[in-house]
Amino acid sequence: MADLLSIERLSAGYGEAVVLADLSFSLAEGRSLALLGRNGMGKTTLINSIVGVTHRFGGTIKLAGRDITRMRPDQRAHAGVGWVPQERNIFKSLTVDENLTAVSRPGAWTPARVYQLFPRLAERRGNMGNQLSGGEQQMLAVGRALVLNPRLLLLDEPLEGLAPIIVDELLAALKRIIVDEGLSAILVEQNAQKTLGVTDRAMILERGVIVHEADSAALKADRGVLESYLGVTDARPRRAAAH
Ligand SMILES: Nc1ncnc2c1ncn2[C@@H]1O[C@H](COP(=O)(O)OP(=O)(O)OP(=O)(O)O)[C@@H](O)[C@H]1O
Ligand SMILES: [Mg+2]
């Protein structure tokens, strides 16, 4: 399968500080990647570098064969980079409906389909962004990225700080988007087990360097790697093995 995203020897950071050093990887069309790592390891910096809001020191970024390295963030969005930032950038003083229609572009994902995906949003379509719960705001942030009909969807910790029931709802929606619809995506998460259930491949970052790459299913079962790089595994030890 052809590469949708191809990153070669990327070094990037903020101001003078290099956070990502000489990083290379690619993602095939229709595939998904879990981007894992402890706090401060460079996950957001990598996502932001694809979006185009970090300082690049070197390297190239290609989307579907097109060099987007020197494009502005708005040009990259137009080229097909969709982004759900860690801080959920919805318009707080617009309604749910206005948030979606303001940015909608022609394609398979329409506001109506977003409402099918998130019935909670449909019920609150007349509410202002600032009248939504954290979970609903996150659903709206995902919906806003979808109606731009991106070729690649970047999700930065979409489950962070949400109640367990909302986490499950969002995960089910992400599964539909990524697994059933086959939208290419990079999903940043702290919760490895949940993320690995919806992605094909996984990559672990440590201090801006890729320290492990594997199929998600293999990593999910690899307690040693999960423990050494991510600290805790939320995989429950099997009782029989524990005693
Ligand atoms: N705007 C910024 N200016 C300067 N340094 C920054 C900035 N944002 C992040 N950093 C630094 O870059 C490094 C990587 O941060 P980054 O936000 O990419 O980590 P992360 O893996 O996304 O962490 P988290 O899981 O906490 O979101 C950290 O050392 C952080 O302090
Ligand atoms: Mg982050």
Image: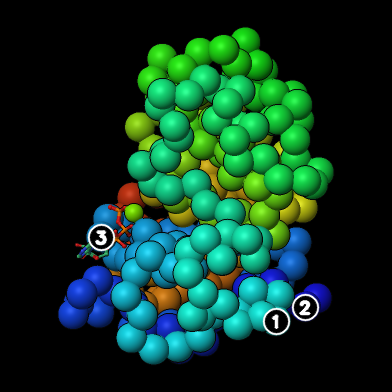
- Label 2 near label 1: C-beta < 8 Å? yes
- Kindly indicate the quadrant of the structure image that contains residue 209: bottom left
**Of helix, strand and loop, which one carries label 3?**
loop
Amino acid at dot 2: Ala
Q: Residue reaching furthest left?
A: 16
Name the residue nearer the viewer: 208 or 125.
125
- Percent position of residue 12, x then y: 34, 78
Quadrant location of ligand 2?
bottom left
Query: Counting residues from the N terminus, which is met first, the one under dot 1 or under dot 2?
Result: 2
Mark 2 lies within 8 Å of ligand 1 (Cβ measured):
no
Residue receiving disc 3: 40
- Percent position of residue 69, x then y: 51, 80
Question: Badge 1: how crowded within 10 Å, few (<14), some, or many (20+)?
Answer: few
Amino acid at dot 1: Gly
In the image, residue 106 sits, relative to residue 112, either above or below, namely below
Q: Residue at x 65, y 16 (%)?
A: 122
- Percent position of residue 215, x then y: 62, 66
Q: Residue at x 51, y 85 (%)?
A: 60
Residue receiving disc 2: 2
Q: Is residue 194 left or right of residue 232?
A: right
Question: Badge 3: how crowded within 10 Å, few (<14), some, or many (20+)?
Answer: few
Q: Nearer the viewer, mark 3 or mark 2?
A: 2
- Kindly indicate the quadrant of the structure image that contains residue 226: bottom left
Quarter holding the N terminus? bottom right
Q: Which mark is residue 89?
A: none
Q: By what rule are the colours in the image chosen?
A: rainbow
Q: Is residue 4 left or right of residue 1?
A: left
Mark 3 lies within 8 Å of ligand 1 (Cβ measured):
yes
- Label 1 near label 3: C-beta < 8 Å? no
Residue receiving disc 1: 65
In the image, residue 112 sits, relative to residue 203, either above or below, namely above
Q: Residue at x 53, y 43 (%)?
A: 194
